[in-house]
C-alpha cells in the first residue's frame, strides 16, 4: 500500500493565519496550494519555507474581486 500525500488549498497563504497553516501542514509533509493577492515576495518566502520544512507549497496570485475566469486561468498558467 502506498502512502497518499495530502493536499490542502489555503487562501491568504502568504501572511498571518494562512501562512501559519501552510507551514504547519508543510512540516507534516502536506502539499499546499496557496493563494495570495498582492504579496508575491512573501508568497515566495512561504513557499521556500514550506519546502525547507519537508512539504511543498505552490502559490497562486488570486484576487477574489476579479470575476473574469479567463484572466485567472492566464495567471495560473504563468
Image (spheres, rainbow, N blue to C red):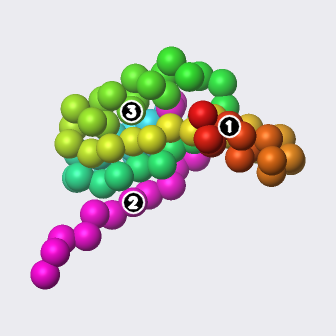
Graded by Cα atoms within 10 Å as few (under 14), some (14 to 19) or many (20 or more), the crowding at tag 2 reads some
Disc 3 from disc 1: Cα separation: 17 Å
Disc 2 from disc 3: Cα separation: 14 Å
Q: Residue furthest right?
A: 67
The residue pinned by badge 1 equals: 75
Vertical relation: 37 (above or below) 70: above
Q: Position of residue 1 (x, y in %)?
A: 13, 81
| Residue 7 in the figure: left or right of residue 67 | left
Of marks 1 and 2, the one in the foreground? 1
Which residue appears at 44% of the width and 36% of the height? 19
Graded by Cα atoms within 10 Å as few (under 14), some (14 to 19) or many (20 or more), the crowding at tag 1 reads few
Is residue 35 among what the camera can see?
Answer: yes
Which residue appears at 22% of the width and 32% of the height? 52
The residue pinned by badge 3 equals: 47
Graded by Cα atoms within 10 Å as few (under 14), some (14 to 19) or many (20 or more), the crowding at tag 3 reads many
| Residue 65 in the figure: left or right of residue 2 | right
- The stretch in magenta equals 1-15
| Residue 78 in the figure: left or right of residue 42 | right
The residue pinned by badge 2 equals: 7
Amino acid at each position: 500500500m502506498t502512502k497518499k500525500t495530502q493536499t490542502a488549498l489555503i487562501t491568504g497563504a502568504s501572511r498571518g493565519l494562512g501562512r501559519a497553516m501552510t507551514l504547519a501542514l508543510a512540516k507534516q509533509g502536506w502539499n499546499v496550494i496557496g493563494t495570495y493577492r498582492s504579496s508575491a515576495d512573501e508568497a515566495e518566502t512561504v513557499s521556500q519555507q514550506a519546502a525547507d520544512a519537508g512539504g511543498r507549497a505552490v502559490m497562486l496570485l488570486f484576487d477574489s474581486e476579479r470575476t473574469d475566469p479567463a484572466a485567472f486561468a492566464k495567471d495560473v498558467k504563468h
